[in-house]
Structure formats: C-alpha cells, structure tokens
Amino acid sequence: QAQLVESGGGSVQAGGSLRLSCAASGIPLSANNCMGWLRQAPGKKREGVASIDNGGRTSYADSVKGRFTISQDRARKTLYLQMNSLKPEDAAMYYCAARVPGYSPSLIPSDYSYWGQGTQVTVSS
C-alpha cells in the first residue's frame, strides 16, 4: 500500500526556516517518476511548490525560487523541502506527492497519483 508521510511543519516567524520531510513507502518502483511538494492555503487552490525527478531535475514555483530547495534521498525513500526566508504568504498545508510515471518535474497537482496527509506550516509576521 502506497504511503507518504510528511513531517517537519510548524510555526515560525517571517524570515525563519523549516525543513519538511516525506517518507515514502509502497510507491510502485519506476525508473521514471518524480516527487513534489504542493501546498494549499485556506480559500485557495492547491498549487505546486517544487518538484524533482529521478534524474535530479527540479522545478520551482516562481514565488519560492531562491528560498526553497527540494532534495531527495532515493535510497532512504525520503523527500525534503528546505524552506528559508519564509513569508506569511507561505503559510499553508504542505503535501508530499508522487507522480508515477513522471518523466519530468511537475507543479501541476493533477499530475500526481499519490498524496500524503499534509503538514501545516504557519508563518507569523
């Protein structure tokens, strides 16, 4: 059974940092898949934040470029999102997701087949 479990969310002040982690299990093995972080704030649509494919190619939303870094440890089946210089507008529920198959990184929520339950990020000004 596929399972994605996020951790690392919390409350920080603007300008602070958080590191999100996502432990994956049961995801169908594929030479072509990618992982992503997506978020949803209250009253807003879910949006892609960052994505990384099997070859390490990444894609970021313009709003987080230069501040967030996505990485993965495929041996440990763990995905990370380092978030620096956080802003109040970054506050949202953050979801880890897997795109299988996924031949390139994607920021489109509908491209993802598997989702975690989310971890809350709160940023105070």
Image (spheres, rainbow, N blue to C red):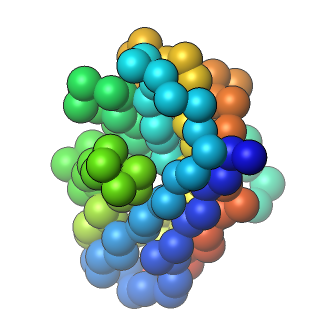
Q: Is residue 69 above or below residue 12?
A: above
Tell me if 100 is positioned left or right of 19 in this view: right
Residue at point 57%, 51% (across, down): 25
Tell me if 36 is positioned left or right of 39 in this view: left
Tell me if 72 is positioned left or right of 42 in this view: left
Residue at point 46%, 37% (across, down): 35
- Quarter of the image with the C terminus is bottom left
Q: 50 or 103, which lies in front?
A: 103
**Could you say where residue 100 lies in the image, as x and y percent from the top left?**
57, 23
Tell me if 30 is positioned left or right of 118 in this view: left
Q: Is residue 89 visible?
A: no
Q: 27 or 35, which lies in front?
A: 27
Residue at point 50%, 47% (across, down): 37
Q: 27 or 87, which lies in front?
A: 27
**Could you say where residue 40 lies in the image, as x and y percent from the top left?**
67, 53
- As drawn, which residue projects farthest toward the left? 66
Q: Is residue 117 visible?
A: yes
Q: How many marks?
A: 0
Q: Is residue 4 above or below residue 111?
A: below
**Could you say where residue 108 lies in the image, as x and y percent from the top left?**
58, 26
**Could you say where residue 113 lies in the image, as x and y percent from the top left?**
69, 30
Q: Is residue 55 above or below residue 3?
A: above
Q: Is residue 106 above or below residue 42?
A: above
- As drawn, which residue projects farthest toward the top? 103
Residue at point 66%, 52% (across, down): 3
